[in-house]
Amino acid sequence: MATDINALVRSRIDALVQEVQSLVRQAALEAVRAALVGPSPDSAAAKPVAAVRPAAPPVRRPVPPPRPAAPQTPKAAPAAPAAPKGKATILRSPLARKLLDYIRSNPGKRTEELARALNVPSARIKPFLRRYVALGLLRTLGTRRATRYVPT
């Protein structure tokens, strides 16, 4: 009895699959035909579903006239050349002086340790450290976060 029901269910499923395959083939053929020669009169695509209002033409806005050019002002005289940045100019900052004095009295400190000792963010003293190294006032030992600064 169970095999009869299984066989009946299987045959109905097979029939359904064949019907769906047939409908898919038919729809694919109609789509290809419509793409090549236009919709056939009996296809669903040829029957209007609802009246479609034609699109309105685009609105053309007038182009504004060009703006008049701004009056030319005479160029200012070039600024005086900046004073060369040397040892004297960098030591004008109180923080820079404190930093250099601290490194001279406590050589071999890292950037984080120097910033903590001076109670400032490390990003605030990094430009001074780079400048001191470039000027030859300090020397570095190590690399990256392990860089330690010593006076020359």
Image (tube, helix red, strand yellow):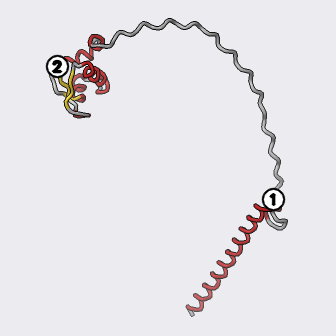
Dot 2 falls on a residue whose secondary structure is helix
Q: Amino acid at mark 1?
A: Val
Residue closer to the observer: 70 or 121: 70
The disc placed on residue 49 is 1
Is 75 situated above or below 96?
A: above
Residue 15 in the image: x percent, y percent?
Answer: 67, 82
The disc placed on residue 14 is none
Residue 54 in the image: x percent, y percent?
Answer: 82, 47
Residue 74 in the image: x percent, y percent?
Answer: 57, 6
Looking at the image, residue 29 sits to the left or right of residue 98; the answer is: right
Residue shown at the point (22%, 31%) measured from the top left? 147
Residue shown at the point (28%, 23%) measured from the top left? 130
Q: Is residue 146 visible?
A: yes
Quarter of the image holding residue 25?
A: bottom right
- Which residue is the site of mark 2? 104
Quarter of the image that includes the N terminus: bottom right
Label 2: how many Cα within 10 Å (few below 14, some 14–19, many 20+):
some
